[in-house]
Image (cartoon, coloured by chain):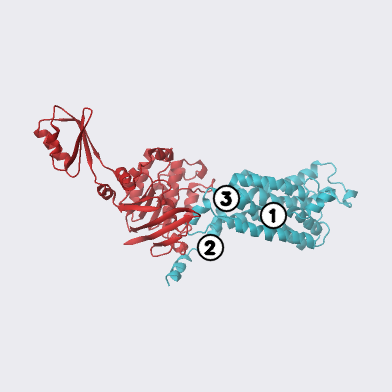
């Protein structure tokens, strides 16, 4: 069942086109990712879904509601975690949960949420004294406090340390298991790959592709690279003849075999037959990042990610 | 039809109950701020009682003041100081910070409209002002033997008009300031001139006549004059002073409403 429908969404700020032409739909129960570099138009797109911004063109429907017009009805059913927002400095964690839950007809159990998000020891701590990760978890708790059917989470793990990121991922999966559909905005490849059932790749205000993470990788070939040092001299043509192998090249002492499909067991078998052992063997799967680069022509900016994490 | 259903569903949580809840939370937060407690609740009384008991001549009838004691003349000044302190020195910083830090925006994603936070802040600050003023009045009457207001109705009208005028200025500052710090800076550079025109340093007729002419057209100068007329002289605030206060309230309030941004 489709619960979010975005068609030809267009949004500009003055001369600057933030979202050019974006269409996608989200099904009930899935984790739908919106992936793209900074400034691609991800946040603006979800702000139109949350009813925070009025589109300049196209239509957005959430449960059949127009977010810009039916804000009050929508907000009872959609919870949002914003990229840049804060709470009152001296508001305590438990007070924030209690305050926000009073806005909803059918709120979640606040204590249970505090427990679930690991904030039990911080109940009486003021917002300004929380760490970045604790603020982020409180923000997620507030997005869930209304018992929403959809949670929209924008740059959920930006600013978190690696352990906190993994904890947050597990949390999101458990939220989905409770029946909440999730729209996840991210510019982290690993996050999208790990969490999303389907994702839309957005670049310069347009959707480049929509598919499962695996599907996206397959779309661009999905090659694997096998890299090893042969234990003894080996005629490369033996490997080039293996079905599925597309190239065999030397990299110093190492042999690099690229190919698709069941190429790994076939290459290992061929090596076995030639009585050669692959030393230090490593298999590199093409990943979302390769797919992204292939689909957009952009090198995904690693430095940019570093900066955001720091 | 679907809109009707949606509105029906949404009406289960009513605005008054949300406003009550948010107001309760905001008052708790204000009370966690020692500066707010001091400046909003204690400062006007402290100044009045401090001057009245420490300054040697403050409780002596002064022929220059038409036989009144300086402390009598100072009571309306202290009330105006209470108004302008809450309206300019406390309120704008809160509102500007709530916008700059995304508190209002965060609220916009919930069934509570962000305006509820603004209204709650106005209510809480008004309550602080009323309490702070009540304490100052009680101190004036009981400790400093100031005469009871000659015209209570006129005093209330003057107090209300002065409050609305000053709060409009405060709202304009919170609309113009980029963040809480900027609101503080603009607030302070507005606060002291307004205190000056209220006569905090030169109360009543001790204010030079040239300055008085300007002060009559400022929200605090007009408020002090309107309050003095009703409290000390038992009359009604003059049309000029009321018109000045209403003009500040309407014009500045309108500009504030037009320039205020929720994010």
In the visual, does B168 lie left or right of B6? right
Instruction: Give the SS element for disc 2.
Output: helix
Specify which label sits upstream in the sequence, 1 or 3. Answer: 3
- Mark nearer the viewer, 2 or 1: 1
Foreground pick, A88 / A118: A88
Instruction: Give the SS element for disc 3.
Output: helix
> Which label is found at residue B15?
2
What residue is shown with label 1?
A: B166
What residue is shown with label 3?
A: B28
List x then y, in percent, for residue A292. 32, 46
Instruction: Give the SS element for disc 1.
Output: helix
Q: Residue at x 23, y 28 (%)?
A: A252
Quadrant, the N terminus of chain A: bottom left
Labels 1 and 3 within one chain: yes
List x then y, in percent, for residue A78. 41, 58
- Mark nearer the viewer, 2 or 3: 2
């Amino acid at each position: 069942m489709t619960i979010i429908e975005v068609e030809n969404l267009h949004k500009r700020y003055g001369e600057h086109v933030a979202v050019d032409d974006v269409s996608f739909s989200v099904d009930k129960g899935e984790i739908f990712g919106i992936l793209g570099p900074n400034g691609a138009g991800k946040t603006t797109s979800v702000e139109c879904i949350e009813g925070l911004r009025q589109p300049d063109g196209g239509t957005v429907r959430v449960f059949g509601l127009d977010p810009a017009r039916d804000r009050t009805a929508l907000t009872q059913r959609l919870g949002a975690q914003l990229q840049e927002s804060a709470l009152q400095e001296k508001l305590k964690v438990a007070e924030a949960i209690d305050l926000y839950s009073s806005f909803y007809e059918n709120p979640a159990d606040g204590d249970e949420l505090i427990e679930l998000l690991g904030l039990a020891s911080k109940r009486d701590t003021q917002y300004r004294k929380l760490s970045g990760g604790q603020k982020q978890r409180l923000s997620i708790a507030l997005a869930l406090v209304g018992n929403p059917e959809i949670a929209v989470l924008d740059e959920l793990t930006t600013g978190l340390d690696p352990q906190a990121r993994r904890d947050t991922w597990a949390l999101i999966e458990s939220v989905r298991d409770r029946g909440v559909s999730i729209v996840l905005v991210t510019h982290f490849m690993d996050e999208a790959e790990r969490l999303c059932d389907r994702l839309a790749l957005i670049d310069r205000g347009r959707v480049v592709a929509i598919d499962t993470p695996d599907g996206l990788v397959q779309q661009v070939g999905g090659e694997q690279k096998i890299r090893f040092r042969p234990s003894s001299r080996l005629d490369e043509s033996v490997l080039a003849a293996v079905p599925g192998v597309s190239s065999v090249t030397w990299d110093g002492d190492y042999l690099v075999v690229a190919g698709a499909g069941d190429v790994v067991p076939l290459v290992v078998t061929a090596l076995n037959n030639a009585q050669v052992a692959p030393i230090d063997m490593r298999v590199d799967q093409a990943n979302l990042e390769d797919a992204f680069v292939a689909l957009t022509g952009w090198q995904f900016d690693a430095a940019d990610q570093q900066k955001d994490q720091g | 039809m679907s809109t009707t259903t949606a509105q029906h569903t949404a009406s289960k949580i009513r605005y008054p109950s949300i406003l009550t809840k948010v107001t309760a939370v905001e008052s708790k937060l204000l009370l966690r701020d020692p500066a707010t407690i001091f400046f909003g609740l204690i400062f006007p009384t402290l100044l009045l009682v401090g001057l009245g008991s420490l300054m040697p001549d403050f409780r002596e009838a002064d022929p220059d003041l038409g036989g009144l004691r300086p402390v009598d003349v100072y009571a309306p000044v202290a009330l105006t100081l209470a108004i302008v302190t809450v309206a300019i020195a406390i309120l704008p910083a809160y509102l500007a910070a709530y916008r700059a830090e995304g508190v209002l925006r965060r609220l916009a994603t919930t069934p509570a409209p962000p305006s509820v936070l603004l209204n709650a802040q106005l209510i809480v600050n008004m309550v602080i002002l009323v309490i702070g003023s009540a304490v100052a009045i009680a101190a004036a009457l009981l400790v400093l033997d100031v005469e009871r207001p000659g015209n209570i109705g006129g005093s209330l009208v003057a107090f209300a008009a002065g409050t609305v005028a000053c709060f409009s200025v405060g709202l304009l500052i919170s609309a113009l300031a980029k963040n809480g710090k900027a609101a503080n800076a603009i607030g302070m550079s507005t606060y002291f001139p307004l205190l000056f025109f209220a006569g905090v340093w030169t109360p009543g007729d001790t204010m030079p006549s040239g300055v008085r002419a300007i002060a009559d057209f400022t929200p605090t100068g007009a408020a002090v004059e309107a309050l003095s007329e009703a409290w000390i002289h038992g009359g009604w605030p003059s049309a000029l002073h009321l018109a000045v206060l209403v003009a500040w309230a309407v014009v500045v309030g309108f500009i504030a409403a037009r320039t205020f941004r929720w994010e």
